[in-house]
Structures are given as structure tokens and as C-alpha cells.
């Protein structure tokens, strides 16, 4: 297994409207970076877990578990929402789906 993908774990960020600029701005939050092994879930497993195919689900494997709570994760600029987080002794597996 190669832990070559840089994964960004984000928690507590909110978008608020700024009346002066007229744009939404992201405020607060905590960001944590980890190197991980990221793989596609596969068609058969997508059908089994989510009941449909083509939803862009991934599996993220980490050497050391993320102990802090996180709301979503980003990989190569794409946002993913976690569906399940399993922690084994000193490793962690996260099943995530691409955010809409």
C-alpha cells in the first residue's frame, strides 16, 4: 500500500455572508493534513453499500488515526463527505462519497 495522496481533514468551517463585499466567506475551522492510500470503492461494493452505482465513492486508509472530529475531507481539491469511519489498533479506514 502506498500512502501517497495528501488528504485534508476539515472541521467546523462555516460560510457566512459578508455584506460589505457581497460574497460568502469561509470562517473558522480546523484543518489537518495526512498522507493516505486512496482507492475507488468499485462497482460491486458501491451497489452493496449504497444501493446504487456511479456515486464516486472512495476508501481512504490511514497509518495513524485522525482523533479529532471532522466534517468533510478534501482530496486534490474535491470535497468528500465521510459515510463510515472504522478505527483498528493503529490504522483507520474511511468510506467517503463525493459531495454534491
Image: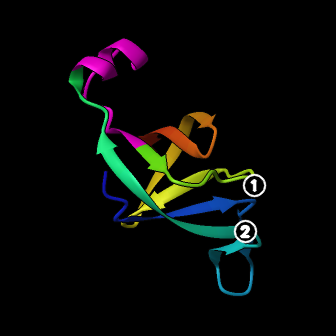
Q: Which mark is residue 85?
A: none
Residue 79, relative to residue 48: is it above or below?
A: below
Q: Which residue is the extreme one toward the front?
A: 89
Residue 15, relative to residue 82: is it above or below?
A: below
Q: Are marks 1 and 2 in contact (CB under 8 Å)?
A: yes
Residue 49 percent location from the top left of the image: 41, 17
What kind of element bears circle 2? strand
- Quarter occupied by residue 32: bottom right
Residue 20 percent location from the top left of the image: 73, 87
Q: Magenta span covers which residues?
A: 44-59
Colouring scheme applied when the structure was drawn: rainbow
Question: Of residues 7 and 53, which is closer to you in this image?
Answer: 7
Q: Which residue is mark 2?
A: 30
Q: Residues within 10 Å of mark 2 (few under 14, many from 20)?
A: some
Residue 1, relative to residue 94: is it above or below?
A: below
- Mark 1 or mark 2: name the one nearer the start of the chain: 2
Judge whether residue 100 can be spotted in this image: no
Q: In percent of the image, x 66 and y 50: which residue is there?
A: 71
Asked if residue 5 lies left or right of residue 83, the reply is left
Judge whether residue 87 can be spotted in this image: yes
Residue 95 percent location from the top left of the image: 47, 36
Q: CA distance from mark 1 to mark 2?
A: 9 Å
Residue 95 located within the stretch drawn in magenta: no
* Number of marks present in the image shown: 2
Q: Which residue is mark 1?
A: 68
Residue 53 located within the stretch drawn in magenta: yes
What kind of element bears circle 1? loop
Q: In percent of the image, x 59 and y 51: which residue is there?
A: 72
Amino acid at each position: 500500500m502506498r500512502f501517497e495522496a495528501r488528504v485534508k481533514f476539515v472541521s467546523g468551517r462555516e460560510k457566512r455572508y459578508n455584506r460589505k463585499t457581497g460574497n460568502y466567506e469561509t470562517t473558522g475551522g480546523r484543518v489537518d493534513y495526512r498522507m493516505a492510500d486512496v482507492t475507488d470503492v468499485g462497482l460491486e461494493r458501491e451497489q452493496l453499500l449504497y444501493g446504487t452505482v456511479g456515486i464516486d465513492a472512495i476508501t481512504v486508509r490511514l497509518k495513524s488515526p485522525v482523533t479529532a472530529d471532522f466534517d468533510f475531507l478534501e482530496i486534490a481539491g474535491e470535497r468528500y463527505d465521510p459515510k463510515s469511519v472504522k478505527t483498528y489498533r493503529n490504522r483507520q479506514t474511511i468510506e467517503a462519497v463525493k459531495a454534491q
